[in-house]
Every structure is written in C-alpha cells, then in structure tokens.
Image (cartoon, rainbow, N blue to C red):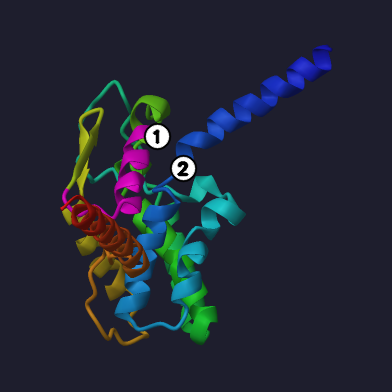
Amino acid sequence: MRIFVFGMSVLIALMIIGSPASAWWNDTHGALAEKVCRDFNCSCIEDIAEWSNIPDALFKDMINHHDYDTNKDCPESRYWRCPSENDFKASRKVQEFLDSAEQKEGCSAWKDIAIASHYFFDTKVFWHNVQDEDYFECHKGFEQQVNEHFVNKDTDWTVCTCGICVSYDEFEPWVLEFEEKIGFLDKVYETPLIVENEKNNTFIGNIIESFKDIIYRILRVIS
C-alpha cells in the first residue's frame, strides 16, 4: 500500500512539475502555423497545425520551451521570479529546425518549419520568459483564454491575468517576425491570421434560410 501511495504521489508531482512548461495551446499554435503556410503558399496546410504541436505532443521537451533574457524588462511580482541568467533554449530550437528545413524540400521542410514555429511563438509567451510562475492562477488561465479566442475566431480581444496582458493585435507582427527567419523560401501572400470557416458559415446560413422558409410558410397559413 505504501508503495502504491508513493508511486501515485510521484506521478502527481511529475504532472504538476511538468505543467508550467505548457505553452500556447494547440489551436493557437495551429492558427499561427497555418498563416505562415498560407503566406508561403505551402502545399501542406492540412497537416501544418498538427506538426506545429509536435513539441508538446511528441517531444514533450518542456525544458526547451523557454527563453530567459536578463536584458528584458522584468517587473517584480509575487507571481513570478525574474531570470538571473540568460538561457535561450527555445531560440536555439527555432534555429535548429529552420536549419534542418533548409536542407529539405516540400512537406518535409514544412514539417520542420512548423516545429520551429512552435518554439518561436513560445518565446512570445510572457510566462516562458520568467521562472517559478504561478501556473494555475496565472499561466494556465492566460493561455486557455487565448486559445478559446482562436477557436472562436475572435479578432477583437485582450486577455489579462496577474497583471500580464496580450491582445490579438500582437500576434500578426509575431508571425511576420518568424516569417523573416525563413529566408530560404519566397513569401507569396499576406493572408489574415484568422480565416472564417466557410463550411460553418454555409451551415449556419442554411439553417437561417430554412428557418425563414418555415416562418414564411406559417405566415401564409395564418393569413
């Protein structure tokens, strides 16, 4: 019994320790990578979102998802600790996968670009630039709310937790910054970050039209 309790305690502890490294959630990473893919007219749009989440889903190398820069402004707070040493692990991963992509072609190259995008956009998460942050009160809610906005395809929002805010308007410049790093490919378009889902619009439109037809028929019967 003691062994079982000890084992469960270790498992729970590992889950808690691992949690704070989580970055932008899947839909956020996917939307950002899809814009990059569209801008370069890549032919792998159906897979790019999944590839962009490989670091979280497959690598699980949470230690590589942060960038500590002592030269960045870091306000003191009870919710986090400012880094005392530089440690650009995420940035090094970005370069590693972009270098790998440059040696490949087609979707093999884009898979590496998508992975690189994950690490790059993680560097834009405030909570990945500080240490010992309050994950459950600050970090988790911050990223969860952002992800919900991307799921809902919202474009007018600001999310704030524990005194730290991010808005939709910040994301497109980040995408452009990442695209500048892909110097071995030619950019073709400048597409919007949020693209309306035509299928959903058609589905909703059909419901509205059907509802109008029902109302029209009812009014004819009544009259």
> What is the quadrant of residue 158 in the picture?
top left
Residue 61 spot, x, y in % from top left:
56, 50
Looking at the image, is 109 positioned above or below residue 4? below
Q: Residue at x 71, y 22 (%)?
A: 8
Looking at the image, is 119 positioned above or below residue 107? above
Q: Earlier in the sequence, mark 1 or mark 2?
A: 2
Q: Secondary structure at mark 1?
A: helix
Q: Which residue is mark 2?
A: 22
Q: Is residue 171 left or right of residue 64?
A: left
Q: Which residue is mark 1?
A: 140
Q: Residue at x 36, y 85 (%)?
A: 185
Q: Residue furthest top?
A: 2
Looking at the image, is 4 positioned above or below residue 36? above
Within 10 Å of disc 1 (Cα), the crowding (few <14, some 14-19, many 20+) is: many
Residue 103 spot, x, y in % from top left:
51, 84
Query: How many numbered badges does the structure rendering display?
Result: 2
Give, as a single range, the part of the protein colored magenta: 140-156
Residue 36 spot, x, y in % from top left:
34, 72
What type is the residue that disc 1 sits on? Lys
Q: Is residue 81 left or right of residue 22?
A: left
Q: Secondary structure at mark 2?
A: loop
